[in-house]
Image (tube, helix red, strand yellow):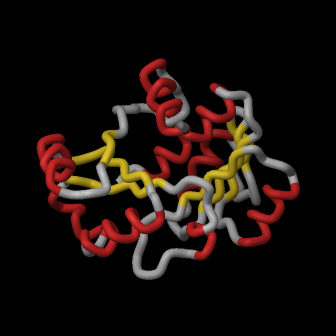
Amino acid sequence: MGVTHLCILMANYFCSGCGKKTSVLEWNHHGDFARFGSVCTGMGQKEDFYQIQGVTYYPEADERKLAQCLKDECENIIIDFGVMRGQEPAELLRCHKAFLVVSFSEWQEGAFGNQNVWKERAIQNSWQCLAAFGSEESRIQWNKRYRPTVLRIPLSVDAFTLTKELMDWMKRLEG
């Protein structure tokens, strides 16, 4: 649905665009961070962390790696929880800002589970809801009928490249 892509974009925005020390933790078992970390850095073996364009990425993160980021006084810690299934991790409930990425593609509707459940959790926890994929018409109709409002994530072909449009959009999310 674009969660990892969005996390990389946000990390690059905070680090390159705002000059803030930023770390990203992969709090799921997808293995994406190890794969792109190895490719982007040219390291053939799996590492505990990767530095890419000033951002520190932690594959297979856990409480110890989160504590290390806090100890290192990271100004922004972004956590990629992946697909929500069932109970949210306690770390999600402690986040200063939380973004729920959904899709309006018919074949992915089951990926974010029962709409009433995530809708209520999003409202209750003040999560911002975002969508990168799917029908724009479906998103507009959703926003007319339901809450929370789902914002469209602008197209980004390369998660490591920030455009002016993306920078402006990220600035609005910060507010």
Query: Residue drawn at (26%, 74%), measured in percent from left and top?
Result: 114
Placement of 18 over or under 10, stated as above or below: above
Q: How many marks?
A: 0
Where does the image place residue 161, in percent across and percent down from the top left?
Answer: 52, 27
Give 15 or 29, whichever is nearer the viewer.
Answer: 15
Asked whether, in this view, residue 104 is left or right of residue 57, the answer is left
Taking the view exactly as shown, the residue that stands out farthest to the bottom is 86
Query: Residue drawn at (31%, 66%), measured in percent from left and top?
Result: 119
Query: Residue drawn at (64%, 48%), measured in percent from left and top?
Result: 37
Rendered image quadrant of residue 48: bottom right
Rendered image quadrant of residue 157: top left
Give 40 or 81, whichever is nearer the viewer.
Answer: 81
Asked whether, in this view, residue 99 is left or right of residue 140, the answer is right
Placement of 78 over or under 152, stated as above or below: below
Where does the image place residue 46, in percent across and percent down from the top left?
Answer: 70, 58
Placement of 143 over or under 28, stated as above or below: above
Rendered image quadrant of residue 80: bottom right
Where does the image place residue 53, in percent across and percent down from the top left?
Answer: 69, 32
Taking the view exactly as shown, the residue that stands out farthest to the right is 71
Query: Residue drawn at (78%, 47%), measured in percent from left and top?
Result: 74
Asked whether, in this view, residue 167 is left or right of residue 65, the answer is left
Asked whether, in this view, residue 59 is left or right of residue 140, the answer is right
- Quarter of the image that includes the N terminus: bottom left
Give 166 or 98, whichever is nearer the viewer.
Answer: 98
Where does the image place residue 8, in percent across and percent down from the top left?
Answer: 55, 43
Placement of 13 over or under 124, stated as above or below: above
